[in-house]
Image (spheres, grey):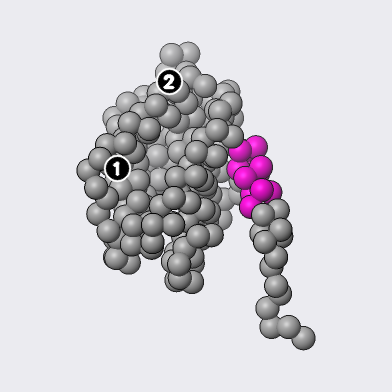
Amino acid sequence: MLANRFISPLDDLIVGFDKALRVVGGVAASSRPNPAAHAVDCELDEREQRHSAGLMRVNHVGEVCAQALYDSQARHAQSPGMRAQFAQAGREEEDHLAWTAQRLTELGSQPSVLNPLWYAGAYAMGTVAAKLGDARSLGFVVETERQVEAHLNSHLDSLPASDARSRAIVEQMRQDEVAHGSAAQALGAEEMPVPVKLAMRAMAKVMTTTAYYL
């Protein structure tokens, strides 16, 4: 009896394609309770509801990208330890994907119609980062999480004060992103060059601005 089942490249490709379809199709399951479960669901006026939905759609896109990034980095990591780290972070990010999708439904809205594009672009970026070596791949994670934390802080400032459910989700996401960045830093992340950081911010700006509406 074989101790480990051999996974062929075709099998691996099929598994990856199936996951991509589930992510962009909005199929996600959380392993932790939704932090909004005990938040008071106050009624929002039309403008507030539209704004909250736009921000949560941006956050959902961010989680679609996170799934693509962590999956690609795990697949191309150079050591089993790195693969396990990226896989664990990806599982935690799936909670965020499920929570934001649920909140979008509650707000009477929907995910970005451009999710396939966001996923493909993020997967390509994660692959490039992983091919540069584990230290640089971890550095990419640190910088990504640093930018995401700033972005979530701005959402906490911008969300309607009465939207306690969205705010609870965003706050838990922020805490998780800080933890992911710290874990990557502790594993020996290499600082990203300034031009790369600026390029990442520019791409994030395009994504967040577009996803708010689409």
Find residue 190 and report its horizontal and vertical position in percent.
27, 58
Give residue 27's quadrant in the image: top right
- Which segment is the magenta one? 16-27
Q: Is residue 75 visible?
A: yes
Of residues 213 and 30, the one nearer the viewer is: 213
Q: Is residue 92 visible?
A: no
Find residue 110 and report its horizontal and vertical position in percent.
58, 26
The residue tagged 1 is 196
Position of residue 32 in the picture relative to residue 1 (left or right): left
Q: Main secondary structure of the magenta part?
A: helix
Of residues 17 and 172, the one nearer the viewer is: 17
Kind of residue at disc 1: Val
**Residue located at (34% from left, 38% from top):** 200
Query: Is 120 colored magenta in this rendering?
Result: no
Kind of residue at disc 2: His
The residue tagged 2 is 51
**Residue located at (49% from left, 44% from top):** 124
